[in-house]
Every structure is written in C-alpha cells, then in structure tokens.
Image (spheres, grey):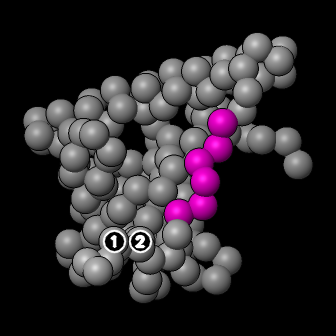
Amino acid sequence: MPERRKIPRYPAKFRVYFPGFNIWGNTSNISLDGCYVVADAPMSQGFITDLLLELPVVGVIALKGYVQHLGKTNSGAGLQFVQVRFDFAQSDYFNLYSQFLKTISQLDKIKADYLDLVQQDRLKLCVMPSKPEKAETPSNS
C-alpha cells in the first residue's frame, strides 16, 4: 500500500505523560502533525488531551493532542497535535517541537552520508560492544 502521509514520520522513542489521565507511554514515531504513543493504559478515540513530551537535549514540552485513532490492540494511540491559537505558550511549545523535528531530518542526512562512506569503503561501520549485565568491580585483596 502506498504511503498516504505527506509529512515524514521518524522512528523515535521518547517518554510521554498524559497528566489528565495519569498515563505514561513512549512514542514509536513522530512527525510535525503528531505521534504514535504506546501507552500502559487504554485511551479513548476523539479526546483532546494535554501531554508532556520529553525531547532529548531540549527537555519536556507541553502539547495538546487529539486522539485520532487507537492501536489494533488498544495499547496505543495515534495523536494529532492541536495548536491552540489563542494560547501563546502552546504555540511556543509547538514551535520548539517544530525546530526539534527539523534537526531529526538533518540527523537522517548525516546518517545517510555515514552509510554512503561505509558503502564506498572509506569508513568502517562502527558498533558498540554489548554492555555487560553487571559491571565487574575490582577486588580489594
């Protein structure tokens, strides 16, 4: 099935909190228009809700979202961001979010450049080693 969305979505796992419902979750993808949130409690379609979204480096921002659709197993919801025109703080938060999203597309370009250099054998693809379950501590013998 061809992609119908006109605005790109980016895979991203950011913490989300819905203060009005005391529900926690994580995004699975984000876009300028909204995000998909996997939550630990069911949500109701059609509601407009406040949400706190924790963005790396930036911090926590407050947005409003309309629950556009529910996940197949009711373990998440697709949210469409609602910009409240007469609330200046809401517009400022959305503007910060918009700026953050622009950096994600720049990071995608950097990643593509990196992978191109690997493909050309100019760089080696680096990976982190597996982190041990428990760090060993030196003994005091």
Residue drawn 64% across the image and 44% down it: 127
* Residue holding disc 1: 138
**Residue 46 locus on image (x, y percent):** 44, 69
Examine the image and state in which quarter residue 115 appears: top right
Front of the two marks 1 and 2: 1
- Relative depth, front residue between 92 and 83: 92
- Relative depth, front residue between 103 and 133: 133
Can the viewer see residue 85 in this picture?
no
Q: Does the stretch in magenta take in 127?
A: yes
Residue drawn 67% across the image and 77% down it: 72
Residue drawn 32% across the image and 47% down it: 55
State the predominant SS element of the stretch in magenta: loop
Task: Answer left or right for 70 relative to 62.
Answer: right
Q: Does the stretch in magenta take in 57?
A: no
**Residue 68 locus on image (x, y percent):** 51, 61
Q: Amino acid at mark 2?
A: Ala
- For residue 135, the mark is 2
The magenta segment is: 126-131
**Residue 108 locus on image (x, y percent):** 59, 28
Between the residue at mark 1 and the residue at mark 2, the CA separation in whole angstroms equals: 10 Å
- Placement of 67 over or under 85, stated as above or below: below
Image quarter (top left, top right, bottom left or bottom right) of the C terminus: bottom left
Density class for disc 1 (Cα within 10 Å; few <14, some 14-19, many ≥20) is few
Can the viewer see residue 34 in this picture?
yes
Q: Amino acid at mark 1?
A: Pro
Q: Secondary structure at mark 2?
A: loop
**Residue 19 locus on image (x, y percent):** 20, 72
Task: Answer left or right for 22 relative to 15.
Answer: left
- Placement of 64 over or under 42, stated as above or below: above
